[in-house]
Amino acid sequence: MANLKEKYTKELAPQLQEKLGLKNKMMVPKLEKVVINSAFGIVEKDAQKNIVDDLAKLSGQKPMLCKARKSISNFKLREGMIIGAKVTLRGARMYDFVERLVNSALPRIRDFRGVPNRGFDGGGNYTLGLKEHTIFPEMLDTGGGSDWGMDITFVSTARNNAEARELLVALGMPFAGK
């Protein structure tokens, strides 16, 4: 099977144009980027390194470390401490990640009935939260560390929630209660 990017340009984009009633093919919504964000909070250096390494293995590129902007004494948090990591995927890596997420990771979730419809922001973007990183096949037994979650944001050129949903459905995203 051809990869998802080729399938989108050859098959899915013309279908979306017809389904949404768009006259210009440049108005057809498409994915701009996928952002994977994991906030792990205050953890030991070894656990932090393991999470960052797993995120790099998952995405195919090195994550950017996110530091605390201000100190909060009740949480024992100091300004400048590393509390999270994020990766922005574009182009071929983005489509590869979306394909792996839809075809192999989401079906591995126990009692999976589809992703929720409430993750749209009104501007054509969708955010999905995952509780465990172990649903991805490349994360099989990553050394007995703790499970950590992530937020995955799909940023698209869609103008509203309906167009964004149609785009994600065309890419294979299984929504709950179609």
Image (tube, rainbow, N blue to C red):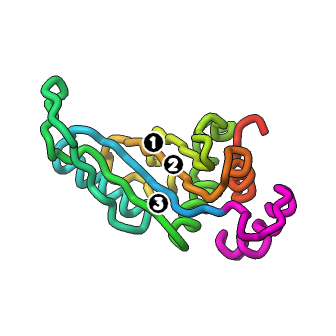
The residue beneath circle 2 is 135
* Rendering coords of residue 124 (x, y %): 62, 49
Q: Is residue 154 above or below residue 73?
A: below
At numbered mark 2, what does the secondary structure look like: helix, strand or loop? loop
- The label shown at residue 92 is none
Task: Using a 10 Å C-alpha cutoff, classify the residue at mark 1 as few (fewer than 14 neighbours), some (14 to 19) or many (20 or more).
Answer: few
Task: Using a 10 Å C-alpha cutoff, classify the residue at mark 2 as few (fewer than 14 neighbours), some (14 to 19) or many (20 or more).
Answer: some
Residue 173 visible from this viewpoint: no
The residue beneath circle 1 is 132
The residue beneath circle 3 is 138
Q: Which residues are magenta?
A: 1-29
Question: Marks 3 and 1, Cα distance to the nearest angstrom?
Answer: 13 Å
For the residue marked with disc 1, what is the amino acid?
Answer: Glu
Question: Marks 2 and 1, Cα distance to the nearest angstrom?
Answer: 6 Å
For the residue marked with disc 3, what is the amino acid?
Answer: Glu
Q: Tell me whether the residue at label 2 lies in contact with that at label 1, contact meaning CB atoms closer than 8 angstroms.
A: yes
